[in-house]
Amino acid sequence: MSLLAGIDWIGFLIAMVVVELTPGPNMGWLAALTLREGRKAGFAAVAGITFGLSLQLLAAITGLAALIAAAPTVFGLLHWAGVAFMLYLAWAAFTDGASAVTADIGSERGFRRGVIANVLNPKALVFYVLLISQFIDASTGPVWLQSLILGLIHLSIAATVHIAIVLLAQTLGARLETWRTSLAARLVFAGLMVAIALWIALTPPAA
């Protein structure tokens, strides 16, 4: 059986894209930084964010593989924890996006801020452990390898979205921030998060 045969690719890609397009601190900060300091600073910040998420991914792979090896039945617990986490993200999408984000970082460079913000963000680690585990089928191959492949795909999607924000920030200007903080955008993405949570809840966990 192929290593990735048990993965629901459509569901995984939809979940990753929705998560990355949801208005949040990284989106607002990247747009504000680019408007204030230019695309070079914006791209440096994207590199920092991606590197920080990569460190969280490596930590998650190690921890998740250890959990599965120690207790295979943990998939059931991770399944419902993943549902709860998506509901939490839905609430965060509705509330966090309402706050304006500035690019006031003093003398700190964008790359360093991007790394620190994501390494010190526990939500990133929880995201990789709980959400990625929903798409892993332990019967088809090593958990760590499936986690790595899915995590790298997420990093690619995240980097693409962040680069697009930097490219669009100077063109769209304040309209991007207006959309990010609008009630309509927050309601739509919160609703999508709830829908994904329900889909996960109704999909039996792979084991």
Image (cartoon, rainbow, N blue to C red):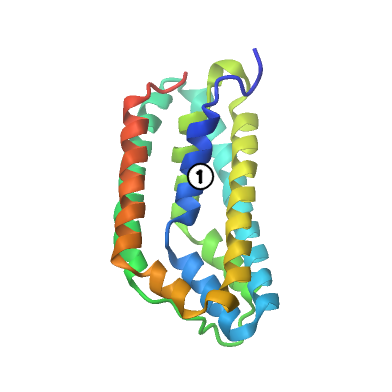
Asked if residue 56 is positioned above or below residue 207 in the image, the reply reads below
Asked if residue 61 is positioned above or below residue 141 in the image, the reply reads below
Three-letter amino acid code at disc 1?
Met
Q: Residue furthest right?
A: 40
Residue name at image x 58 percent, y 45 percent: 154
Task: Give 67 or 21, whichever is nearer the viewer.
Answer: 21
SS class, disc 1: helix
Q: Is residue 24 left or right of residue 143?
A: left
Percent of width and height locating residue 144: 61, 31
Percent of width and height locating residue 31: 53, 74
Percent of width and height locating residue 134: 45, 31
Percent of width and height locating residue 21: 48, 55
Residue name at image x 48 percent, y 33 percent: 11
Q: Quadrant of residue 152?
A: top right
Residue name at image x 65 percent, y 58 percent: 51
Q: Is residue 62 left or right of residue 71?
A: right
> What is the tally of numbered marks visible in this picture?
1
Residue name at image x 64 percent, y 37 percent: 148
Q: Quadrant of residue 161?
A: bottom right
Asked if residue 121 is positioned above or below residue 6 in the image, the reply reads below
Asked if residue 200 is positioned above or below residue 137 in the image, the reply reads below
Looking at the figure, which quarter contains the N terminus?
A: top right
Please rate how many residues cluster around mark 1, counting C-alpha atoms within 10 Å: few if below 14, some from 14 to 19, many from 20.
Answer: some
Residue pointed to by mark 1:
16
